[in-house]
Image: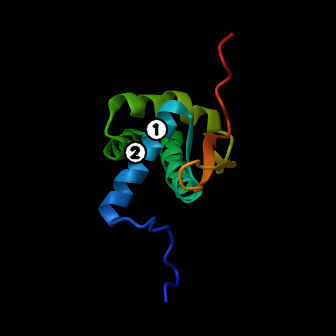
Amino acid sequence: MRHLRDGRKLNRSASHRRALMRNLVKALILREQIQTTDAKAKELRRWADRIVTLGKRNTPHTRRQAFAYLGSDDLVKRLFEDVAPRFQNRSGGYTRVLKVGTRRGDAAPISLVEFTERKSPAA
């Protein structure tokens, strides 16, 4: 029985799953909107929300934790200066998953993952 076992396995080994989620979070912070399969999108939501919560705290320790996960000074700077300040008054639910349709090749369900507070386009 798998009582209290959370998270999806996504038919990958633990290290592959960790790398996949890390890359998806990096892409989401960089682009603020990505398309992926439904299962990956639902799992990504958990990890992205945790990273944004780190960004909201904005202490040297949380910057180091974010760098350990993201591995890039540019992404850490973007998280702490652009993404996280938008969510200061929100206590959770930083991402949304919208179902888009199916993938042409294998009919896998595809979703769009984006931040709920979008940066307004510069006019």
Residue 65 locus on image (x, y percent): 36, 46
- Residue 23 — which label? 2
Number of the label disc, if any, that sits on residue 90 = none
The foreground one among 69 and 62 is 69
Residue 103 or residue 89, whichever sits in front: 103
Residue pointed to by mark 1? 27
User: Does the image show residue 32?
Assistant: yes
Q: Position of residue 87 (x, y in %)?
A: 63, 38
Neighbourhood count class around disc 1 (C-alpha, 10 Å): few under 14, some 14–19, many 20 upward: some
Tell me whether the residue at label 1 lies in contact with that at label 2, contact meaning CB atoms closer than 8 angstroms.
Answer: yes
- Badge 1 marks a residue whose secondary structure is helix
Q: Is 20 situated above or below 73?
A: below
Q: What is the three-letter code of the residue carrying label 2? A: Asn
Quarter occupied by residue 60: top left
Question: What residue is at 40 percent from the left and 34 percent from the top?
Answer: 76
Q: How is the model colour-coded?
A: rainbow
Q: Amino acid at mark 1?
A: Ala
Residue 75 located left or right of residue 85:
left
Q: Nearer the viewer, residue 36 or 24?
A: 36
| Most distant residue in the front direction | 105
Give the percent coordinates (x, y) of residue 104.
58, 47
Q: CA distance from mark 1 to mark 2?
A: 6 Å
